[in-house]
Amino acid sequence: MSLLRVLLAIIFPPLAVVDKGCGSLLIVFLLTLCGWVPGVIAALVILNKNN
Protein backbone atom coordinates (compact mmCIF):
# COMPACT_ATOMS: atom_id res chain seq x y z
CA MET A 1 0.00 0.00 0.00
CA SER A 2 1.73 3.13 -1.20
CA LEU A 3 1.40 6.63 0.18
CA LEU A 4 -0.31 7.78 -3.01
CA ARG A 5 -2.98 5.09 -2.65
CA VAL A 6 -3.61 6.06 0.97
CA LEU A 7 -4.01 9.71 0.01
CA LEU A 8 -6.37 8.77 -2.81
CA ALA A 9 -8.37 6.60 -0.41
CA ILE A 10 -8.76 9.55 1.93
CA ILE A 11 -9.56 12.16 -0.72
CA PHE A 12 -11.66 10.11 -3.18
CA PRO A 13 -12.01 6.45 -2.14
CA PRO A 14 -13.36 4.94 -5.41
CA LEU A 15 -10.36 6.20 -7.36
CA ALA A 16 -7.99 4.35 -5.02
CA VAL A 17 -9.54 0.93 -5.70
CA VAL A 18 -10.24 1.28 -9.43
CA ASP A 19 -7.75 -1.48 -10.33
CA LYS A 20 -9.03 -3.95 -7.70
CA GLY A 21 -12.04 -5.00 -9.75
CA CYS A 22 -15.57 -3.94 -10.53
CA GLY A 23 -17.05 -5.36 -7.32
CA SER A 24 -14.65 -3.49 -5.06
CA LEU A 25 -15.17 -0.28 -6.99
CA LEU A 26 -18.95 -0.60 -6.76
CA ILE A 27 -18.90 -1.35 -3.03
CA VAL A 28 -16.61 1.57 -2.23
CA PHE A 29 -18.61 3.90 -4.48
CA LEU A 30 -21.90 2.99 -2.79
CA LEU A 31 -20.39 3.34 0.68
CA THR A 32 -18.95 6.72 -0.30
CA LEU A 33 -22.41 7.83 -1.41
CA CYS A 34 -23.77 6.78 2.00
CA GLY A 35 -21.07 8.70 3.77
CA TRP A 36 -17.48 9.67 3.27
CA VAL A 37 -16.11 7.79 6.30
CA PRO A 38 -17.49 4.34 5.36
CA GLY A 39 -16.06 4.76 1.87
CA VAL A 40 -12.63 5.63 3.22
CA ILE A 41 -12.66 2.70 5.63
CA ALA A 42 -13.72 0.25 2.91
CA ALA A 43 -11.07 1.56 0.52
CA LEU A 44 -8.33 1.23 3.13
CA VAL A 45 -9.45 -2.30 4.01
CA ILE A 46 -9.48 -3.35 0.35
CA LEU A 47 -6.08 -1.77 -0.27
CA ASN A 48 -4.63 -3.45 2.83
CA LYS A 49 -5.87 -6.92 1.85
CA ASN A 50 -3.11 -9.19 0.52
CA ASN A 51 -3.87 -11.18 -2.61
Image (cartoon, helix red, strand yellow):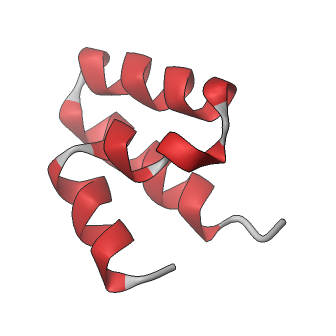
Depth check: 42 or 4 in front?
A: 4
Give the side of residue 48 with respect to residue 40, left or right: right
Residue furthest to the left in view is 11
Give the side of residue 35 with respect to residue 28, left or right: left
Quarter occupied by the C terminus: bottom right
Residue 23 drawn at (x, y percent): 67, 25
Q: Is residue 42 above or below residue 11?
A: above
Residue 20 drawn at (x, y percent): 63, 46
The residue shown at (34%, 43%) is: 15
The residue shown at (54%, 24%) is: 27
Q: Kindly indicate the quadrant of the structure image that contains residue 33.
A: top left
Residue 16 drawn at (x, y percent): 39, 52
Q: Is residue 51 above or below residue 30?
A: below
The residue shown at (60%, 69%) is: 48
Q: Kindly indicate the quadrant of the structure image that contains residue 47.
A: bottom right
Residue 43 drawn at (x, y percent): 45, 49
The residue shown at (49%, 47%) is: 17
User: What is the count of numbered marks?
Assistant: 0
Residue furthest to the right in view is 51
Q: Is residue 41 above or below residue 51?
A: above
